[in-house]
Amino acid sequence: MDPVLSRDGVSDRSFFVFNAVVSISALAFIAYILLVRATGPADGVDLGFLPAVNASLNGVSALLLAAGWVAIRNRNVRLHRYLMVSAFAASALFLVCYLTYHYVHGDTRYQGEGWIRAVYFFVLITHIVLSMVVVPGALSAFYFAWKRRFDRHRRLTRIVLPIWLYVSVTGVVIYFMLR
């Protein structure tokens, strides 16, 4: 079967284009904020509370992902669906808060020294690289589930779930290492 056609012969191309546009736009905006845009503290706007909110959203997302995995292993499809939609919502809200904070305040520099600095950058780099998979992977997983193409959904989530979980957990770790 053509990988772009669903079982009913309808093209998935529009979804894949949508997914690519959303994913590339998010990555481009993050790259612009962190690598291109020069900024200092914003006048009159203090969003210093958002890193703690972001860490909390990452932690909640990780817990919801783990609970969703347990639910589907126990064949509780309805609970799995609610938990995974909630995890996606927590991660989406995280992304909005993350972009908002960094748009206003710019990048946060790590102050640690010695061997812990190497650990921090290892965690940060793996977090950043793997986070690039989460948006398109999660959108695709939701799409395949919505289309009831559970064979593709399962194949994809065997890869995406551990990555999404790692990114959520390391987001919390990075927050604490920066503090």
Image (cartoon, rainbow, N blue to C red):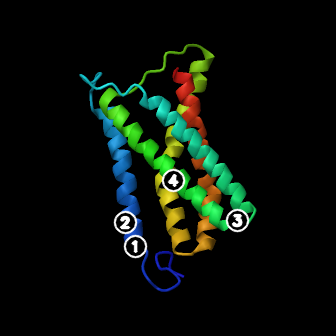
Residue extending farthest right: 74
Residue under numbered circle 1: 13
Query: Tag 2 or tag 4, which sits nearer the N-term?
Result: 2
Q: Secondary structure at mark 2?
A: helix
* Mark pair 4, 1: CA separation: 23 Å
> Which label lies toward us, 4 or 2?
4
Circle 4 residues within 10 Å: few <14, some 14–19, many ≥20: many
Tag shown at residue 88: 4
Callouts 2 and 1 close, C-beta under 8 Å = yes
* Mark pair 2, 1: CA separation: 6 Å
Query: Tag 2 or tag 3, which sits nearer the N-term?
Result: 2
Q: Secondary structure at mark 4?
A: helix
Q: Position of residue 143 (x, y in %)?
A: 49, 67
Q: Secondary structure at mark 3?
A: loop
Residue under numbered circle 3: 76
Query: Tag 1 or tag 4, which sits nearer the N-term?
Result: 1
Q: Tell me what residue is drawn at x 56 percent, y 75 percent.
A: 148
Circle 1 residues within 10 Å: few <14, some 14–19, many ≥20: few
**Mark 3 is on which residue type?**
Asn
Which one is nearer the viewer's eye here, 118 or 32? 32
Q: Position of residue 102 (x, y in %)?
A: 36, 32
